Image (tube, rainbow, N blue to C red):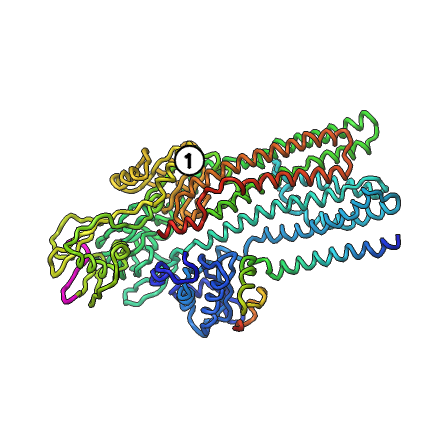
Amino acid sequence: MSGLSVLIPVAIGLGLIALVTFLWTLRSGQYDDLEGASQRILDEDADRPAFDAHQGKARR
Amino acid sequence: MTCCVPTAETVELSQQGGIETDDEALLTLSRKLGDGTRQLEFAVPDAHCASCIRSIETGLDALPQVKSARVNLSKRRVRVVFDPELGPPKALSPTIRASGYHTYVLDPSVDEDGDPGLRELVKALAVAGFAAGNIMLFSVSIWSGANDATRDLFHWISAIIALPAIAYAGRPFFRSAWRAVRVGKTNMDVPISIGVILATALSLYETLRSGEHAYFDASATLLFFLLAGRCLDHLMRERARSAITNLARIAPRGATRVREDGRREYLALMEIEPGMVLELRAGDRVPVDSAVLSEGASFDTSIVNGESMPRAIGTGDEVMAGANNLGGLVQIVARKRSEDSLLARMVALMEAAEGAKTRRRRIADRAAAVYAPIVHTIAIVTFLGWGLLTGDWHNALLNAVAVLIITCPCALALAVPIVHVVAAGKLFEGGVLMKDGAALERAAEADSVAFDKTGTLTVGQPRLVSQQVENEAAGQAAALLAAASTHPLSQALARTLFRGDATATQVAEKPGQGVEGMIEGRVWRLGSRSWCGLGEGEADATSVWLSRDGFAMGSFRFEDEVRPDARDAVRQLVDLNLPVRLLSGDAPLPVATVAASVGIPDARSRLMPEDKVAEVERGRTMMVGDGINDAPALRAAFVSMAPSTAADIGRSAADFVFTGGALSAVPLVIGTARRAATIVNQNLVLAIGYNAIAVPLAVSGQVTPLIAAIAMSSSSLIVVLNALRLRLGRSSWPTRTQNLKEAHA
């Protein structure tokens, strides 16, 4: 039983972290352009993340 | 489409005017961001790779007024944030075109930030997935032998996870079920909601009294599967919707008014009153029904009434809203208000055309209407039967809930959308956009096909069919002059003959008459018979004459070009047992010519929009059309398709929109729809077969949570796998690349 009292919180905690992370990625628009993300990786210079797009003039 | 190189077509487009070059109109379209900057969205339908993104973004970033430019490759759009203080917005679209891409501005009111329903569903899916995974962790422990205190502990933890998760993730179903029940109807969500809520409530009760079985895992897994199906359905519609929005060039929302004192002002469509004098540039559409003031104007009315050839319209003659100005600057005087104009009349006709499609209910709803009462009766009978026979009402309730869980139409709710999603993906590859799954069900049941002529069976552009010229040099002279003109006949001529090994000077165009220019010291004229000084002949909009110093040098005849694969498409449709008709608003002769060349025996000409509606309302007709005059028929027809070049109103009325200009899309849609219908039926049979096995088990009280979990997952998997079969098999349909090639050939 003592093992369970550690493992259960750990298991649920990990699940919760994954859930919160997913909701965060969803909110920050990381799924808005899946096709673009897969292409941008081929472009050496364009390494800014999608959700920074509106924060001023892009660097080149 | 050539990748990343400006095509001839792009250059051609970049010369056109339109809303993109109008600062005032662009500013009204843009969205204010608060800090003085504004945001506009442009469609870039051809962007498709990393270097496309790069060239568009770097091109825009180089402009001083651009704060940021970001391409969304999934939506084929670029979002530009700019500061109007630092430069005009009209520089934006020429910059994108200079990078080599078609572009036009999007109306932000049409399309905000996507589908809010989809976001809610994805969040609910995430929560349900989290809950299902973690509860399953404890359920597996229980099934593998955890008992007594441990089992109770696990049940309690499951309950703590499940209750909030189900309350959150189940909302889409509960809401929809409540809406249906309140008005005394039933839909698929009613049995889902009842099953999930009862299973959860019973499990909670069992947990409280340290019972052996709890169904928390079943409730959470059920919701997860159902939400997955529903998300896919929304994703499919979202993709089609954004692709269709990208096609929508913004119609004129106003026009330039010439005041009596000569000043010009831009008026919104609603502010235009009869009697106002308006000015149209080349390429502008007529905003309201008007009379022409200028001499020698010519208009392309193909989208209004299906007439294939440009029409010269004299002073005082009427021109309908939606006609396209082909000449230079033209002044017109408004005759009607916007709400009385042709376009508005078509909208009224469309509203009147109720159409067969609204009377028809979707397969899933029809299945639910039969399914739900049967399931609920079985559950009640189980409850009463066990209770009355054994006197153990607690056990009776357990068994009745097991019946509800087992019959919860998971497979059924997944069986239909998943097939539609797969079919939509397959059609998308073939260049066809499907608006929703119901259209696919109807396409499978269509029993005849009706085509419009101009712009649908034909390209809607004239093609040179015969020429008589004195010598080779005369042909080249004609091509040279034609290249300088924007008239569609000239452009067709230049496309066919132009070689570019001579030059013309002093080229001047007289709208509605022709072009004049000096070549090697002589005056050449290309245009109407009278313009070339060849005397008055029969007014003929399909011929162009050529003269040198007033002497006839040749003539050219044009016809609207039939789409290259029209004949094949018609034959394939006949092979599919679908009679084909041709419904056109054009004159009998061109209609008969086209009908003969594509092999349609049943052709009608000079049809008014009302006549077309009456024609398509017979039986279950699939209407394929593009013009403003087709819009009511597209709405009234059982199922409808429009090419992506169609008028906005026609495209929004149609169920399917095909890109790439190939009519093979029509048999592709019918074929895919029929295959999809077969697979949907198979899936329904599978789902019912699963119930036929599982329900007796549940009624007899043999279903434990473990059996329920296995049965549900396996039945869902089977229907998903069966749906994926649609992707396999026949790969002989043309792909999108082939379509594009044909369209460019």
Image check: B70 left or right of B570? right
Q: Is residue B180 visible?
A: no
Name the amino acid, label 1: Thr
Q: What residue is at 64 percent from the left and 60 percent from the top?
A: A25
Q: Position of residue B317 (x, y in %)?
A: 24, 51
* First to last magenta residue range: B520-529
Q: Position of residue B712 (x, y in %)?
A: 69, 39
Q: Position of residue B652 (x, y in %)?
A: 44, 48
Instruction: State the quadrant of the N terminus of chain B.
Output: bottom left
Image check: B602 left or right of B368? left
Q: Is residue B744 above or below residue B207?
A: below
Q: Position of residue B700 (x, y in %)?
A: 77, 29
- Residue labelled with disc 1: B621
Residue A18 on the magenta span: no
Q: Is residue A50 visible?
A: yes
Residue that lies at the very extreme toward the top in this rendered image: B389
Label 1 Cα neighbours within 10 Å, binned few <14 / some 14-19 / many ≥20: many
The local secondary structure at tag 1 comes to: strand
Please give the count of numbered marks on the rendered protein: 1
The quarter holding residue B250 reads bottom left
Q: What residue is at 15 percent from the left and 63 percent from the top?
A: B523
**Chain of the residue on which disc 1 is drawn:** B
Main SS of the magenta part reads strand
The quarter holding residue B96 reads bottom left
Depth check: give the residue in front, A14 or B429: B429
Depth check: give the residue in front, B317 or B472: B472
Depth check: give the residue in front, B303 or B233: B233
